Image (cartoon, coloured by chain):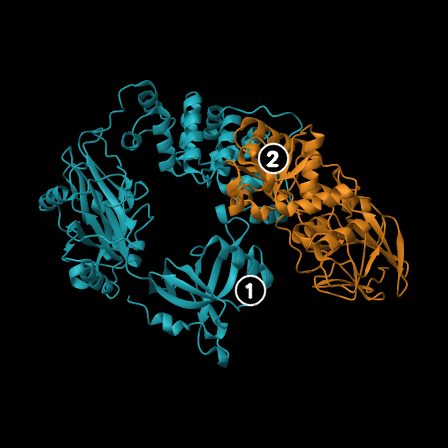
Chain colours: A orange, B cyan
């Protein structure tokens, strides 16, 4: 007999854990929020109490100054919430501090993945597959056209462009939380030890990563550089700054962007990107479908992204699934 | 194929025109014959493989992946070739890419009976970028922002010849353009073409917009609402004379207009507007039916006697490029006009007449005359510099078009669909409607048109988001919106139509403004649209 999961309710602005009266990644202020990770579409300021990993709380504090009301939950730690609900934060492999949240109540186990990926990432703990009855998964790249190539290949493309254009700089647009630090760490792992220059908006988050033990090598601010110093180097900025007036100070930049969307040529063109780097912090199609298979839940619920295709895949594989119509999750900049 | 695939990718991601030209020119210089010729043909839409169509790709893929997943993917990516290149199962063995000419050979040997077995063999020899290049080559629709003109300019740049000469020698040459490369790259004699009925590149006009010109230097002419054509007669290979009618893009449309093709007995190259006899444009004196009437004749492979009688076509002449092997193109406009007027006396008046000049001594006079153009159902006016030579393409300062101002109505957004090409994955194709009565009294919205341009990139992003957040229904790739957004739609003219439930059809509709300030019930009613019809 199918178990009753009515104690958890997807509403348009978040997932409501009814007996504990708390919300997972709500898009509006609530009394009690359980937060999976620090990206702005999942973690918002203004909640009464926020339960999240210490890293995520640090990120939220940096962004929203939400020192008040934070309840840290380390990976693997189980908190008991009102209404006999137990919540455990499990690594999701998305960005520093990102977690899946396992909820246990009335003998049922539900996992909310937040965002996740399965590939190794030197800047965060790897996704840990965990058995559950209901697996509430993201589907940002839930179309079979999305198969991210190995990160090493993409980093190789970047270093090749750099070497081939000693008079220019390569300006990489990368999401300020997660993608930028991962890209820098991967460049370091590939042996690139030169100074990497940062747009001012990236600095604090990079420092936060360093405080949490992620070594990013020599980082300096573009604002402190002479133009000729930047020739032949890598500059990292938020995607929004790529075609901004800000980038005019750079020496003939090659515009690159690190994002899973770069798989689709016209998406790269729309962003006016010359050097697309297919680097994503989300699971691609193969990872999504493999994860559902591995976790093997009784039901799969899909929060946001290309939910139709994952639904179809579930149907073809005789898996119970439903799409939740959540609003407010942005996925355009990954 | 790797080099060609790399070229395509580099072109996709390169914005600057000069950088594109350099990429193309380098490729054309460094790649051997015949590969470079085939590549050039692919980029200029000069290849056709009848066995490989967009539907072929779909069929191949839906044998290998679930059809629903194919459709969702294709809809998202906005390009069949790219979708297929990404969805194609990775072959077990490492790639062994064919050369471009090897691929072209294989593609041209395929038939509908063999393509489903042969094309996979080629795809299995390539990686994802190679598959993309192969499928682009095979289906023709490049959509990578390279116009034929740009490719020809790159060819000229690669071999240091003039682009005018390239244009001139281009037509009549078949891929892989061996004679063209021999001429440009190795200094051989240009291909002999003067006795063939070949297309010559059109001279085009810039929109006048804010430009102020002195009418002493320009003449004005009506801009008739038909299609621009070039009529060419030459001795041909038989020497008996062959006539061709070419559309603006250089397509041979002679078969659709046999009455024009048979009416000419002088060897000439003429520029004019193809029209159907009638009194819609400019009344009896104008002598031309509406564009709608001409549309009945377009795109037909064979033409019935009834069609010929009901919609008799003629060409209203604008210019003469060549008359009896004398090339007039370098002469000033007034000299060509004099030659055209003399020539017109010798032509069949049923099929050819002269575009008359408009007497206007200054722009204000002309503006007043242009204002009347709508009542006369004419598109607008043309301004041509009296001393302008006939040069290919759009040269600043020589010719201007000054269209009458568009009509606008306020419509309600009803449906949206994802676009293709550079609008790929954005909801950018909009269907909008007007009220069939009083919305307060329960009237319905009926679709009155569809548009996918007119907005800025920023507005497109906004509209895309709007559609996603206001979807009430999905029908495959189409989203139905909650019908709350008013769009100001501009269009050139509006006509009765039996094909549309609303009974009207717009010409050149485009989104001119997003009217978030206006509630949907204040959008226009179909009655007011009907009032704008001049049929």
Residue B481 tag number: 1
- Chain letter, disc 1 residue: B
A47 over A183 or under it: above or below: below
Residue A263 appears anywhere in the view: no
Which of B160/B316 is in front?
B160
- From the viewer's side, name the closer residue of B391 and B267: B391
Instruction: Select label 1 or label 2 by which is in front.
Output: 2
Horizontal side, residue B266 vs residue B112: left or right? left
Instruction: Report crowding for label 1: few under 14, some 14 to 19, many 20 or more residues within 10 A (C-alpha).
Output: many
Task: Determine the image quadrant of residue A162.
Answer: top right
Q: Position of residue A193 (x, y in %)?
A: 68, 29
Q: Along the horizontal axis of the image, is B36 left or right of B351? A: right
Q: CA distance from mark 1 to mark 2?
A: 44 Å
Question: Disc number at residue A234?
Answer: 2
Q: Are marks 1 and 2 on the same chain?
A: no
Give B48 or A253, whichever is nearer the viewer. A253
Please tell me which residue is depicted at 82% across the width and 44% down the height of the picture. Answer: A128
Q: Residue A328: percent from the left, percent from the top? A: 66, 59
Dot 1: element: strand
Residue A287 in sight: yes
């Amino acid at each position: 007999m199918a178990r009753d999961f009515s104690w958890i309710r997807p509403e348009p602005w978040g997932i409501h854990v009814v007996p504990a009266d708390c919300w997972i990644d709500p898009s509006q202020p609530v009394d009690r929020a359980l937060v999976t990770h620090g990206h702005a579409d999942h973690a918002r300021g203004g909640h009464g109490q926020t339960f999240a990993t210490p890293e995520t709380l640090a990120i939220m504090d940096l962004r929203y100054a939400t020192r008040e009301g934070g309840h840290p939950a380390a990976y693997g730690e189980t908190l008991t919430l009102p209404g006999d609900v137990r919540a455990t934060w499990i690594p999701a492999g998305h960005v520093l501090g990102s977690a899946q949240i396992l909820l246990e109540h009335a003998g049922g186990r539900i996992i909310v993945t937040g965002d996740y990926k399965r590939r190794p990432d030197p800047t965060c703990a790897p996704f840990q597959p965990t058995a559950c009855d209901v697996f509430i998964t993201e589907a940002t790249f839930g179309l079979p056209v999305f198969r991210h190539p190995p990160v090493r290949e993409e980093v190789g493309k970047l270093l090749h462009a750099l070497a081939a254009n000693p008079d220019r700089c390569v300006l990489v647009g990368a999401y300020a939380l997660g993608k930028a630090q991962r890209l820098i760490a991967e460049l370091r792992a590939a042996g690139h030890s030169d100074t990497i220059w940062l747009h001012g908006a990236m600095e604090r988050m990079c420092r936060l990563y360093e405080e949490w033990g992620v070594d990013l090598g020599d980082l300096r601010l573009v604002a402190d550089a002479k133009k000729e110093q930047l020739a032949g180097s890598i500059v990292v900025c938020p995607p929004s700054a790529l075609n901004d007036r800000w980038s005019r100070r750079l020496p003939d930049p090659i515009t690159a962007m690190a994002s899973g969307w770069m798989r689709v040529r016209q998406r790269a063109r729309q962003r006016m990107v010359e050097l697309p780097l297919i680097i994503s912090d989300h699971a691609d199609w193969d990872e999504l479908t493999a994860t559902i298979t591995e976790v093997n839940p009784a039901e799969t619920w899909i929060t946001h992204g290309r939910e139709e295709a994952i639904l179809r895949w579930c149907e073809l594989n005789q898996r119970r699934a439903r799409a939740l119509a959540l609003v407010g999750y942005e996925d355009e900049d990954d | 194929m790797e080099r060609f695939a790399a070229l395509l990718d580099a072109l996709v991601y390169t914005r600057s025109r000069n950088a594109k030209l350099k990429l193309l020119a380098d490729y054309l210089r460094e790649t051997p014959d015949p590969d470079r010729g085939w590549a050039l043909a692919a980029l200029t839409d000069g290849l056709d493989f009848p066995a490989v169509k967009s539907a072929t790709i779909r069929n191949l893929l839906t044998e290998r992946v679930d059809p629903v997943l194919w459709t969702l993917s294709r809809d998202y990516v906005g390009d069949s070739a790219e979708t297929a290149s990404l969805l194609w199962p990775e072959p077990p063995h490492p790639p062994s890419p064919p050369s471009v000419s090897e691929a072209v050979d294989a593609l041209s040997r395929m038939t509908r009976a063999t393509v489903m077995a042969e094309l996979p063999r080629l795809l299995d020899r390539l990686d994802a970028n190679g598959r993309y290049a192969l499928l682009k080559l095979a289906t023709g629709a490049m959509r990578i922002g390279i116009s034929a003109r740009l490719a020809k300019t790159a060819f000229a740049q690669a071999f240091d010849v003039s682009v005018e000469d390239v244009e001139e020698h281009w037509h009549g040459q078949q891929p892989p353009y061996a004679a063209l490369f021999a001429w440009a790259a190795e200094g051989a004699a240009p291909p002999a073409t003067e006795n063939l009925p070949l297309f010559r590149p059109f001279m085009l006009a810039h929109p006048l917009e804010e430009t102020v010109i002195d009418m002493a230097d320009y003449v004005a002419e009506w801009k008739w609402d038909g299609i621009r054509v070039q009529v060419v007669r030459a001795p041909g290979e038989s020497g008996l004379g062959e006539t061709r009618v070419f559309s603006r893009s250089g397509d041979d449309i002679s078969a659709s207009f046999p009455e024009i093709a048979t009416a000419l007995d002088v060897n000439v190259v003429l520029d004019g507007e193809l029209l159907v006899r009638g009194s819609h444009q400019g009344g009896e004196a104008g002598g031309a039916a509406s564009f709608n009437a001409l549309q009945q004749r377009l795109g037909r492979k064979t033409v019935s006697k009834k069609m010929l009688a009901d919609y008799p076509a003629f060409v209203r002449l604008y210019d003469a490029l060549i008359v009896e092997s004398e090339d007039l193109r370098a002469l000033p406009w007034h000299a060509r006009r004099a030659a055209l007027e003399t020539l017109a006396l010798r032509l069949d008046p049923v099929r050819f007449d002269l575009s008359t000049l408009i007497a206007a001594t200054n722009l204000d006079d002309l503006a007043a005359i242009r204002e009347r153009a709508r009542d006369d159902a004419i598109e607008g006016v043309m301004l041509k510099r009296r001393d302008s030579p006939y040069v290919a393409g759009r040269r600043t300062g020589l010719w201007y078009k000054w269209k009458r101002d568009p009509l606008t109505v306020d419509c309600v957004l009803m449906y949206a669909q994802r676009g293709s090409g550079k609008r790929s994955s954005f909801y950018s194709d909009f269907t909008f409607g007007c009220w069939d009565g009083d919305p307060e009294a329960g009237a319905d919205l009926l679709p009155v048109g569809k548009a996918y341009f007119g907005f800025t990139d920023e507005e497109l992003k906004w509209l895309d988001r709007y559609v996603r957040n206001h979807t009430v229904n999905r029908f495959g790739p189409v989203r139905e919106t909650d019908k709350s957004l008013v769009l100001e739609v501009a269009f050139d003219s509006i006509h009765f139509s039996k094909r549309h439930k609303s009974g009207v059809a717009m010409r050149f509709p485009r989104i001119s403004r997003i009217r978030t300030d206006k509630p949907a019930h204040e959008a226009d009613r179909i009655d007011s649209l009907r009032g704008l019809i001049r049929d």
